[in-house]
Amino acid sequence: MLALLGWAIGGIRLLEIFVFCALLLVGGAYWTFDRVVLGMVHARELPLAEAPLLHSTVERLAARAGVLKPKLYLIPDGMPLALATGRGPMYSALAVSSGCLGACPPAELEGVLAHELAHVKHRDVALQTAVVVLAASMIELSRVGGWLQRALLFVLGPVAAACTHALLSPKREFEADARAAELCESPHGLADALLRLDQASQLVAFEASPATEPLWTFNPFLEEGLAALFVTHPKIEARVQRLRALAPHEEVPAA
């Protein structure tokens, strides 16, 4: 788009300048978008001394997954949530909400962490992070105020949602679920966690940019209004059914 704009304004010479600027923009985005995402969800780095058991669990799962241990962050929110961001297996960050740490038993928390590490292993996080920042930027551009706000949101909202759906497939969630079951040596911890998170979403209010939906372990937003445009996660029931089918004869742990 910048190349076409440069060519239209000043021909080949300006086109080259605009392309060079675009490459600088992409390079800068690649190295900084993870920090943008963590800032969007108000996450802070979680020291080892504050949560040694969590650090130990993540380190063990990361070793099994064949990725470097991600940096750990805490999201100060009562909703049980988790997300991963970064550039892939060699550099990533994993953020967990205080609600998730308080509500999920160890087996369920391990399943959630394994799911996010599976996204890191498959390099989903790089694409997810870029798409979310792009979509969120479009939404924020519409907040100029005045009579233009509604018109811009009407145009930019669907465009941002279309970009999200074009680049992200629900299939990646099923694949991350299956990989998480392998890392935990059982699918039932994650299956139980998904059910718990889904129930919590109906009881606890959650406020964030709807464009962040692809980052979370599940969809924490009510599927209405602008949030309905950004739904990329499969239904919880379908994910749980697939997970249970991975070990149909294994005893399901009591909730």
Image: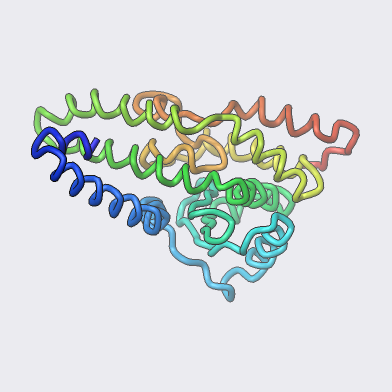
Q: Residue at x 25, y 40 (%)?
A: 140
Left or right relative to 200: residue 104: right
Give coordinates of residue 223: x percent, y percent. 45, 25
The part of the image, by quadrant, that contains residue 164 is: top left
Q: Quadrant of residue 4?
A: top left
Q: Residue furthest right?
A: 249
Q: Is residue 12 above or below residue 61?
A: above
Q: Is residue 240 above or below residue 101?
A: above
115 left or right of 148 in image? right
The type of colouring in the image is rainbow
- State whether residue 98 appears in this view: no
Percent from the top left, x then y, of residue 198? 58, 35
Q: Nearer the viewer, residue 169 or 20?
A: 20
Relative to 75, is 140 on the left or the right? left
How many numbered callouts? 0
Q: Residue furthest front?
A: 12
At a point 57% along the width and 42% down the height, the residue shown is: 217
Residue at (40% x, 45% y) in the render: 130
**Residue 195's x, y, as percent?**
65, 35
Q: Is residue 108 above or below residue 67?
A: above
Residue 11 appears in the picture as rendered: yes
Q: Position of residue 255 (x, y in %)?
A: 76, 42
Split into 4 quadrants, where in the image is the N terminus? top left
